[in-house]
Image (cartoon, grey):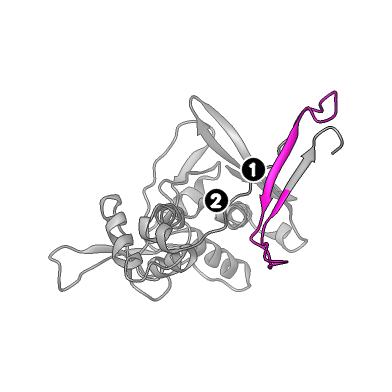
């Protein structure tokens, strides 16, 4: 939910938990002397732009609904083209770049009755999905073309299969597998899925030595008399001394 005034812009990141709406984060920012001269539309758009950049690490790969009370901004997001009329000055150029950053090639818009309006439903930050036709398939596939490389969007039923095709070639680590998959495909929570499947790979568990957690040092109650509790252990093998390579240790818990 975003809003703007004559002096500042701000946003609140909220999530529906059961029947309640809980706030997860806040983003306030004062306007500069130049930004205070912006029109109402530009200030409202600036609040959306800055809040999306601020919470991008949370929004990326997830469905997001943005709420605003500015009707012209809602209309701008329903246009097929986000190119605005550029007049003299830099304000419209800034607004055009901000609107292009926030808007994707496709999104579903829906109105919510009340004091706020949902302007984007199913918003994926940073992706530019377009239908692409491949010679090997009769149907077009939605692909991300924002990076200049065509990366098909993988539906849930094929994600594990795609992971196996890439990971099973040489069984690389988590980070390398994530990079290899991300360079070719896109889907929601890709890094999280790749990490989980790498951790559960039986071949990797058998052939790779991972750091094991060490158990905590044990705590024993102090006895009330000498030699009531003894700790005995064998240390070795050590370098031979007079033909012997092991030590027998004995510790009285009372004197320890």
Q: Which residue is mark 2?
A: 58
Pointers 2 and 1 in contact (C-beta within 8 Å): yes
The x and y percentages for residue 28 are: 71, 48
Element on which disc 2 rests: helix
Residue 244 falls inside the magenta stretch? yes
Quadrant containing the C terminus is top right
Segment colored magenta: 219-248
Residue at (40% x, 76% y) in the render: 148
Q: Main secondary structure of the magenta part?
A: loop
The x and y percentages for residue 197 are: 39, 54
Element on which disc 1 rests: strand
User: Relative to residue 78, is residue 242 drawn left or right?
Assistant: right
Residue at (36% x, 71% y) in the render: 170
User: Relative to residue 108, is residue 85 drawn left or right?
Assistant: right
Residue 51 in view (yes/no): yes
Against 184, is 156 above or below?
A: above
Residue at (60% x, 50% y) in the render: 213
Q: Which residue is mark 1?
A: 25
The x and y percentages for residue 199 are: 44, 54
In which image quadrant can residue 23 be found?
top right
């Amino acid at each position: 939910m975003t809003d703007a005034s004559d002096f500042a812009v701000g946003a609140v990141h909220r999530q529906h938990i059961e029947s309640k709406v809980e706030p997860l984060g806040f983003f306030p920012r004062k306007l500069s002397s130049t930004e205070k001269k912006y029109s109402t539309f530009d200030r409202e758009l600036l609040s959306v732009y800055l809040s999306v950049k601020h919470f991008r690490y949370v929004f990326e790969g997830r469905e997001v609904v943005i709420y605003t009370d500015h009707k012209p901004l809602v209309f701008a997001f329903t246009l097929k083209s986000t190119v605005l009329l550029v007049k003299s000055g830099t304000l419209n150029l800034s607004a055009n770049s901000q609107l292009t950053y926030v808007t994707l090639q496709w999104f579903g818009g829906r109105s919510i009755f009340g004091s706020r309006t949902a302007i984007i439903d199913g918003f994926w930050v940073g992706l530019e999905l377009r239908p692409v036709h491949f010679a090997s398939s009769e149907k077009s596939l939605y692909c991300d073309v924002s990076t200049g490389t065509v990366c098909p969007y993988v539906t849930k039923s094929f994600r594990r299969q795609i992971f196996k095709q890439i990971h099973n070639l040489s069984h690389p680590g988590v980070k390398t597998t994530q990079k290899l998959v991300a360079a070719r495909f896109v889907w929601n929570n890709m890094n999280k899925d790749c990490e989980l499947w790498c951790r559960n790979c039986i071949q990797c568990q058998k052939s790779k030595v991972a750091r094991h957690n060490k158990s905590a040092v044990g705590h024993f109650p102090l006895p009330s008399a000498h030699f009531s509790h003894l700790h005995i252990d064998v240390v070795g093998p050590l370098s031979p001394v007079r033909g012997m390579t092991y030590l027998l240790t004995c510790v009285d818990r009372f004197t320890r």
